[in-house]
Image: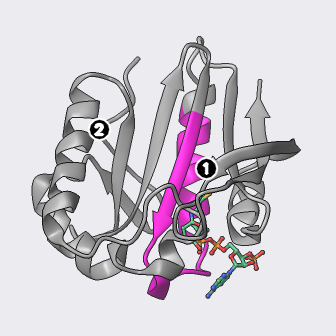
Amino acid sequence: MPPPKQFETTRLFARIPRLADAEPVFEAYAQDSEVTRYLIWQPYTEIEPLRDFFLNCIRSWATNASFPYMLCLKGTDVPIGSIHMNIDNFSAGFGYVLAKPYWGQGLIPEALSYLVEWALAQPEIYRTWAFCDVENPASARVMEKAGMTREGILRRWHICPTISEEPRDCFVFSKIK
Ligand SMILES: CC(C)(COP(=O)(O)OP(=O)(O)OC[C@H]1O[C@@H](n2cnc3c(N)ncnc32)[C@H](O)[C@@H]1OP(=O)(O)O)[C@@H](O)C(=O)NCCC(=O)NCCS
């Protein structure tokens, strides 16, 4: 079954991305090097490349390549973060980001928990997983709060270009059935 195009948690409304999300995301977090520190992308300095990114997000839903969601506080339609799910055969992988003013309120664990439970309820999905830089304990806590447990370290697994061009070690977490 394809993932839902939108879902709600206690405090969040998650929906598929739109091109018009580029502006609020540019303002809320895309230029922030503290936010991008452990991500695969560097801070955006112009809006146009971010629009291209959103076009790709929209395409990826159309082709089932990846399932990105924009996260809005319930009752609003303004994105404050995002979470994506990649389904690969029998496993679902996740990545997420949130604007800094909203950190520390347990919002991403809410969204991740929803998608982990959705994925494990699919008969063909046996594994949910995500990784984070070994120096990103906030992200490790998110995965623990979503019921995942740490499997180990993926050595030289991921490049965080905001930090350097060298691949870095990551913790890998999973929840399986
Ligand atoms: C990692 C991130 C998604 C966490 O989301 P969140 O909704 O703030 O998660 P939580 O509120 O559950 O907080 C998780 C941990 O962050 C830490 N934290 C809390 N407030 C914080 C703050 N203001 N600043 C930094 N870290 C904070 C705490 O260790 C917390 O764990 P605790 O609840 O056991 O104390 C968010 O910090 C973020 O977007 N970071 C930048 C992008 C990123 O690193 N994404 C993950 C890539 S793998």
Disc 2 residue lies near ligand 1 with CB under 8 A: no
Q: Earlier in the sequence, mark 1 or mark 2?
A: 2
Mark 1 — residue? Answer: 113
Magenta residue check for 138: no
What amino acid type is highlighted by mark number 2? Lys
Give the residue at the far bottom of this rendering: 101
Query: Which quarter of the picture shows residue 177?
Result: top right
- In-image side of 94 versus 83 (left or right): right
- In-image side of 23 versus 11 (left or right): left
Name the mark on residue 67: none
- In-image side of 98 versus 67 (left or right): right
Dot 1: within a 10 Å radius of its alpha carbon, few (fewer than 14), some, or many (20 or more) residues?
some
Which scheme is used to colour this image of the protein? one colour
- Quarter of the displayed picture in which ligand 1 can be seen: bottom right
Mark 2 — residue? Answer: 5
**SS under mark 1:** helix
Query: Which quarter of the picture shows residue 90?
Result: top right
Report the span colored magenta. 93-118
The residue at the point 35 percent across, 49 percent down is 69
